[in-house]
Image (spheres, grey):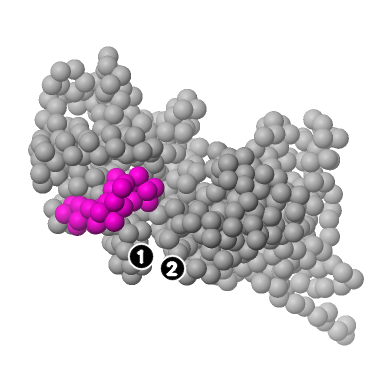
């Protein structure tokens, strides 16, 4: 009887180019040049994640890892970097890889690996989206929540020459193509995820463009009403705006953002009357499943917003418990003029982004709202946020007074409405930035997320806070929650994630993430320079350092000056993180001795 060959349990990564025959048919020389460059990138990334390339087969790569978490991290880093490389290429020249990752037994012989473990990885690759990743159940169990990854359950899949069906998961947030059709997909493969929806910006049908702020406010209020329910996933406003700018219809927008439904509508305001038209569209079919026209006086606007949210919720998740309904209804003022002032304030200062002038104009609006209604919680929380921004940017002659004022106003907002998620988020930021009290800041952040589990900014802020608190795994997990709710993640969140990956010493991942930012700010170039320098890629580090110098007009700084520079953005609990950053900047030639 032949002796059984020795086997070893390893993580296997298999990558292959999607539509390779079409690409070579269109332009064989260009495809080969790009493929050669990408294979080098993949090889370097695998090696930097403690993996080993076993062989190349044309456009395919086979690699093994001792640790499953390294295999999945490597796959994610590869796809992020290739996405950044492909962004400027014409659509027909983009070379996209599918990747499969499996954990299984292999036979090692003559510098290669064989067996069912390898075959399963190859079959997983075939199920992935172009630019995407599929993993087996054994990988999902081994990785768990360590990387903060969100998975889509594809059910058990029959695989050619594999005796038993394999339970498969797609890594969400990576890959933009359409999943390969599976004629043998089982009923178990149907998603069991929560209903998901995007609220598209309502159209202003009024004659006066000045009403844009009012229409934006109505869109956001309806979205906020939906966000408070854990039973559904609501995509963030930023993503909905971007797909609208690309002139997609509601069905296309839902498909592009990976959600099941889209709500669209319009608003016409004339005098003291308003007409709101709403339509709920199923993304997959493009069919309208509900529509309504509301002709009301302006004083009824709060009831209309609540009614739209409740109708959608009832259709998507059935009966709503009265306690949940009561918590979701936020008719915080009866004064329509005060309400409009708050909408104008948010219009000037949205998601804590704005110039000094924008912040001061927003403050004036919130203050006017409080003159009209001194018990308007949303006006207090909005006003508090402007004082935190003033404190952070040094726009005040008395920053300590500005910081104290932010805490006082946030407490007042919570006193008036303890269910206001945003007020708790603002108070968290004040405790962190002004008082450096990480424990109180974390407690308020947890409350904010509990009250509004769909507000993506809670998670973007949470990513930043966790990174500065030294909890890097939690930071990545928060970033992935933000991505889940805002697939077209704004630059601020991408910068935070990239910075966290740098602190985690995942330099390749950090580069890939930061390169997705639409407009790189000076601090982004500085972080890129540090990443490249840590990897020994000195030429690229020097180029990023030059970009930093050109954009910031600062050039080479001393260690003290770098600490002062980062203090505007970073409020670290442990200065070792700043030291790690300065170490990379020094290697990039950006630190003056």
Q: Which residue is mark 2?
A: 573
Image coords of residue 455 (percent x, y):
35, 49
Determine the image quadrant of residue 61: bottom right
Residue under the point 64% across and 57% down: 592
In this rendered view, identify the residue nearer to me: 455 or 377.
377
Give the mark nearest the N terminus, 1 or 2.
1
User: Overall secondary structure of the magenta stretch?
Assistant: helix
Mark 2: which secondary structure? loop
Q: Which range of residues does the magenta coloring cover? A: 385-414
x, y percent for residue 584: 64, 60
**94 relative to 577 in the view: left or right:** right
Q: Is residue 175 left or right of residue 107?
A: left
Who's the residue at 75% across and 55% down the image?
537
Q: Report the residue marked by disc 1.
A: 436
Does 387 lie within the magenta span?
A: yes
Q: Nearer the viewer, residue 91 or 518?
A: 518
Q: Quadrant of residue 27?
A: top right
Q: CA distance from mark 1 to mark 2?
A: 8 Å
Task: For the N terminus, give its image quadrant.
Answer: bottom right
Q: Tags 1 and 2 in contact by the CB under 8 Å rule?
A: yes
Q: Percent from the top left, x then y, of residue 359?
A: 32, 39
Disc 1 packing (10 Å; few <14; some 14–19; many ≥20): some
Q: Nearer the viewer, residue 107 or 442?
A: 442
Kindly state the secondary structure of the residue where label 1 is placed: loop
For residue 295, say whether it is visible: yes
């Amino acid at each position: 009887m032949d002796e059984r060959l020795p086997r070893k349990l390893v993580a296997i990564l298999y990558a292959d180019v999607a539509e390779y025959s079409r690409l070579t048919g269109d332009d064989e020389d260009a495809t080969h040049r790009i493929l050669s460059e990408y294979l080098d990138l993949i090889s370097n990334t695998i090696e930097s994640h403690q993996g080993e390339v076993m062989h190349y087969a044309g456009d395919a790569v086979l690699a093994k890892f001792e640790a499953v978490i390294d295999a999945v991290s490597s796959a994610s880093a590869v796809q992020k970097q290739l996405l950044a490389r492909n962004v400027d290429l014409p659509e027909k020249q983009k070379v996209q890889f599918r990747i499969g990752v499996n954990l299984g037994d292999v036979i090692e012989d003559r510098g290669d690996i064989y067996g069912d473990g390898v075959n399963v990885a190859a079959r997983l690759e075939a199920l992935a989206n172009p630019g995407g990743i599929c993993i087996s159940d054994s990988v999902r169990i081994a990785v768990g929540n360590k990387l903060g990854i969100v998975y889509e359950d594809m059910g058990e899949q029959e695989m050619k020459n594999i005796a038993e069906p394999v339970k498969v998961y797609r890594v969400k947030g990576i890959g933009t193509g359409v999943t390969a059709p599976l004629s043998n997909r089982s009923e178990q493969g149907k998603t069991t995820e929560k209903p998901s929806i995007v609220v598209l910006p309502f159209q202003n049908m009024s004659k006066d463009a000045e009403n844009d702020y009012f229409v934006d406010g109505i869109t956001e209020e309806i979205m906020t009403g939906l966000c408070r329910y854990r039973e559904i996933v609501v995509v963030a406003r930023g993503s909905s705006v971007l797909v609208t700018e690309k002139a997609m219809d509601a069905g296309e927008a839902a498909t592009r953002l990976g959600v099941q439904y889209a709500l669209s509508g319009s608003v016409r305001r004339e005098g003291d009357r308003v007409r709101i038209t709403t339509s709920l569209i199923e993304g997959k079919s493009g069919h309208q499943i509900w529509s309504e026209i509301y002709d009301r006086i302006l004083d009824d606007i709060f009831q209309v917003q609540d009614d739209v949210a409740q109708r959608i919720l009832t259709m998507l998740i059935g009966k709503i418990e009265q306690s949940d309904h009561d918590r979701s209804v936020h008719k915080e003022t009866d004064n329509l003029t005060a309400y409009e002032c708050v909408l104008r304030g948010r219009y000037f200062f949205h998601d804590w982004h704005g110039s000094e002038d924008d912040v001061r104009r927003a403050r004036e609006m919130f203050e006017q709202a409080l003159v009209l209604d001194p018990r308007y919680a949303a006006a207090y929380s909005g006003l508090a946020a402007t004082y935190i921004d003033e404190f952070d940017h040094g726009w005040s002659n008395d920053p300590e007074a500005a910081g104290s004022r932010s805490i006082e106003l946030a407490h007042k907002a919570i006193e008036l409405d303890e269910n206001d998620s945003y007020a708790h988020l603002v108070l968290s930021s004040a405790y962190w930035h002004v008082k450096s009290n990480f424990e109180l800041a974390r407690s308020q952040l947890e409350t904010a997320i509990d009250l509004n589990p769909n507000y993506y900014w809670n998670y973007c802020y949470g990513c930043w806070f966790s990174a500065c608190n030294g909890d890097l795994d939690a930071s990545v997990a928060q970033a992935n929650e933000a991505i889940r709710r805002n697939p077209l993640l704004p630059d601020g969140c991408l910068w935070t994630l990239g910075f966290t990956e740098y602190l985690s010493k995942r330099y390749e991942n950090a580069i890939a993430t930061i390169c997705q930012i639409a407009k790189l700010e000076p601090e982004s170039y500085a972080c890129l320079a540090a990443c490249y320098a840590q990897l020994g890629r000195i030429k690229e580090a020097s180029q990023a350092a030059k970009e930093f110098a050109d954009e910031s007009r600062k050039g080479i700084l001393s260690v003290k000056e770098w600490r002062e520079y980062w203090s505007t953005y970073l409020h670290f609990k442990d200065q070792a993180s700043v030291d790690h950053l300065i170490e990379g900047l020094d290697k990039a030639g950006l630190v003056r001795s």
